[in-house]
Image (cartoon, rainbow, N blue to C red):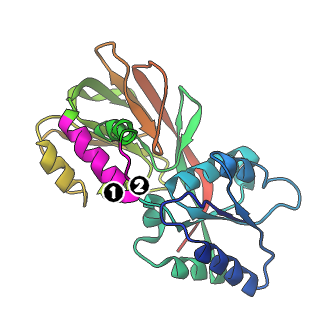
Amino acid sequence: MVVANPAAGTYTREMSEAVVRRIAGVGAAVELAVTERPGHAHELASAVGEPGGPALVVSIGGDGTAHDLMAGLCESAPAEQRVPLLVLPSGTGNSFYREIWSDRPWQDALESALSRPRVRRIDLARVAETDGLALLGASSGLAAQTLVTARTVSDTGRARYEAALARAIEAFRPYPGRVSVDGEVVHAGPTVAVGVGGGRHRAGRFTLLPHSVLDDGLLDVCVAGTALPLPALLRLSRDGSHVGGPGIVYARGRRVVVERTDGEALLFEYDGDLVTGARDRYTLDVDPHALPVITP
């Protein structure tokens, strides 16, 4: 089954049609499902585990579409029976596609999936307070603030994120935070950003967790304090060279707890969706080898 999201940032009908033609060209039965509303991809994926369902789900969309399909597939069947997911890029950031296929054209990824498919079971992060799953990862601090600011920006696509980030930087203030990994406090004090995952890349341009491995059974966490100036943090995190810099903590573990310590609500997101509520802490546990994905 091919699931296409026409609301994705760089979606074209021509790409969806080309994908369907190529799959049909190898003699496989293929169904194209075009999403009609938010959450529709989740609904479609949650039904694929029924008898006679598809052997593969192809995502044509962005990171949000990939997240929704992941969540639906995880509801559809136990881990060992889940249908594999192939992600093709049609969004703005396409961080998960980049995670798997680097800068290879989507046509190459599709050919590889059809001619020599390799299934890799990757880890997910489960947020205890919401019982939700993260595919790419979660964050607090500046990245989460940028999502709030984006609500006030009228631009679309990559320009919207760039404008929101610029506004967020102007207004952002570090928060008093604490981060624990497997019960050990790794950071306490003023906090600019916390990233947990998952994927190495976020927002299509930042390599926040450069040492993350998708199927090692661990969550990576990177914490930025205030020792590294914000412009330098943004510049260095494009290629992951912020790690090892002043005020940067990098760790791995099976459980990560992110807290705000002044009693105020912690601004927190995962897979690009802000979490509502007035909580001051979030707990993330690794869900190892939970999702089969098609990889090179």
Q: Secondary structure at mark 2?
A: loop
Task: Indicate the quadrant where residue 196 lies.
Answer: top left
- Residue identifier under label 2: 156
Q: In this view of the protein, which residue sits in the foreground, 156 or 201? A: 156
Q: Nearer the viewer, residue 19 or 140?
A: 19
Percent from the top left, x then y, of residue 197? Answer: 42, 46
Q: Is residue 24 above or below residue 88?
A: below
Tag 2: amino acid: Thr
Q: What residue did someone put label 1 on?
A: 159
Residue 11: percent from left, percent from top: 54, 66
Who is closer to the viewer here, 159 or 127?
159
Q: Is residue 202 magenta?
A: no
> In which image quadrant can residue 176 be found?
top left
Question: Magenta part of the protein: which range?
Answer: 153-170
Q: Are marks 2 and 1 in contact (CB under 8 Å)?
A: yes
Residue depicted at x 58% and y 36%: 132
Q: Residue 179: x and y, percent?
A: 32, 29
Question: Which residue appears at 71% of the width and 53% of the height?
Answer: 45
Is 246 located above or below residue 31 in the figure? above
280 left or right of 87? left
